Amino acid sequence: MTTERIDRASVGLRSERGPILLAVMLSVGLVAIDATILATAVPSVVEDLGGFTQFPWLFSIYLLAQAVSVPIYGKLADQRGRKPLMLFGILLFVLGSVLCGFAWSMPALIAFRLIQGLGAGAIQPIAMTIVGDIYSVAERAKVQGYIASVWGIASFVGPTLGGVFSDYISWRWIFFVNVPLGLVAGVVFYRRFQENIVQTTRHQIDYAGTILLAVGGSLLLLGLLEGGVIWSWDSVTSIAILSVAVVLLVVFGFVERRAAEPILPLWVLSQRVLNSANSSALLVGVLMIGLSTYVPLYAQGVLGTSALVAGFALAAMTLGWPIAASLAGRIYLRIGFRWTMFIGSVFVVLGSALLLTVKPSSSVVYLAFACFVIGIGLGFSASPGVVAAQSSVVWTSRGVVTGANMFARSVGSAVGVAIFGAVANAMVASRLGDNHDDLEKLPSSVLAPAIHDVYYGAAAAAVLLVVAVLFMPNRVTEMPRG
């Protein structure tokens, strides 16, 4: 791993590559803001369009589309180049945003969120792949600070804009605001990002693998996200969906063994660096969904705070993450990837332990501090893992490994939804029986122990994260950037 000294002037926004970095930041900003801006506007959307029972699908369909398309876009970016796929993703995201803004019913809005999710599935992995292409490992140590700052800003800007638009203008502007950001990012990419791609062979599209991964992955995520929510885990629907998903994914594995250019090469599952990075990403996904779902619920339902205060308690995690991510680069250049990620995992364990000490009498500031500590740990754990994975492969495989890493995080989120939901509901059922309202309507005396059990699950995931990062090599030989 290189030890070259890099000054900020050579990699920052004013450098020769600055416009491309700005376009990456704007593109990531589209996805980052979208992750938080809609939640605060749900009451306004439901009041205008109706469909209260359907609104959870605004989030589920977006997550499904994004998660399943990520590895597909990653492979296509290796075959066709980053630029056309990135421009396509931005175009699709902006188109979906405009259609969402003009939605006339809840089913229409859900359908247009699907389009947005397919666009986000291209933007996030390819943006990070481009960063891996144009910056060395040492340079990314500084560039990470720029990218991380986008998520930090979005954690505050998203909920604020969502509230302002809903209360004073219209919830539809939540989607229209994406148009200028997307257009600027697209124009800069089109004009300033040049790829030197030498096509020496005619690529073959793995249609069978693509279809099997898309359908099998969608059914798996659907079963995990909605099991125990829309249908019970032991229902015919749940068993059928998950069974078909498993069969399709097993068939997918056999197809990929014989494909000339597999959409998700099986060697991704056999390399130590990638296994550690992807396992860590999966566990990060589990922890993120556990916090984002249950911390605000605990703050409101048990500590008695407002929705706004509950949101800022969770924002402490998304503030800690970019701070740590911006510092992680300097650390892994000195002590290596494994020990940097290990430090992060220890912070996650410490933060999870603090969560276990939160009581109904605790201050929301204490809850936020626990989230901040976990955010610090996730920043030190997740960002170096992506850098290590990208650096371990050549240009023609970088999109695949980036997509696989982000897909693993999405699968982790879906698994987390299933596990934590089952844990919380089991605790409630043991006290109230099976006939109980959703968690939001429970008395604090029942809600508090239910969420406390979820925190035990998060602590277990944190310990597993420690194990996963220890398999990461400390030093990774950087392959040519192409």
Image (tube, rainbow, N blue to C red):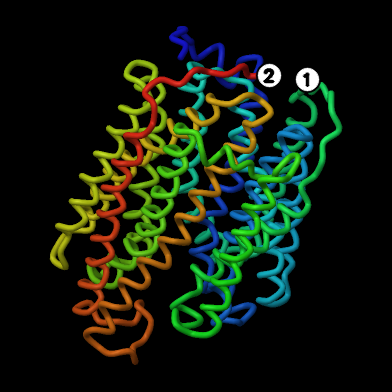
Say above or below: 439 vs 16: below
State the CA–CA distance, disc 1 to disc 2. Answer: 8 Å
* 435 lies left or right of 145: left
Residue at the spot 28% in from the left edge and 90% down from the top edge = 433
Badges 1 and 2: C-beta atoms under 8 Å apart?
yes
Image location (x, y in percent) of residue 160: 48, 54
The quarter holding residue 110 reads: bottom right
**Amino acid type of the residue tagged 1 in the rendering:** Asn
Say above or below: 96 vs 396: below
Q: Quadrant of the C terminus?
A: top right
Residue at the spot 60% in from the left edge and 82% down from the top edge = 51
Task: Indicate the secondary structure of the residue bearing disc 1.
Answer: loop
What residue sits right under mark 1 in the picture? Answer: 196
What residue sits right under mark 2 in the picture? Answer: 482
Residue furthest out toward the top: 4
Residue at the spot 36% in from the left edge and 86% down from the top edge = 437
| Viewer can see residue 44 | no
Say above or below: 289 vs 228: above
- Within 10 Å of disc 2 (Cα), the crowding (few <14, some 14-19, many 20+) is few
Say above or below: 474 vs 65: above
Which residue is more in the foreground, 471 or 410? 471
Which residue is more in the foreground, 311 or 398? 398
- Within 10 Å of disc 1 (Cα), the crowding (few <14, some 14-19, many 20+) is few
Image location (x, y in percent) of residue 10: 56, 12
Which residue is more in the foreground, 170 or 361? 361
Image location (x, y in percent) of residue 325: 40, 32
Indicate which disc residue 144 carries.
none
**Amino acid type of the residue tagged 2 in the rendering:** Gly
* 254 lies left or right of 197: left
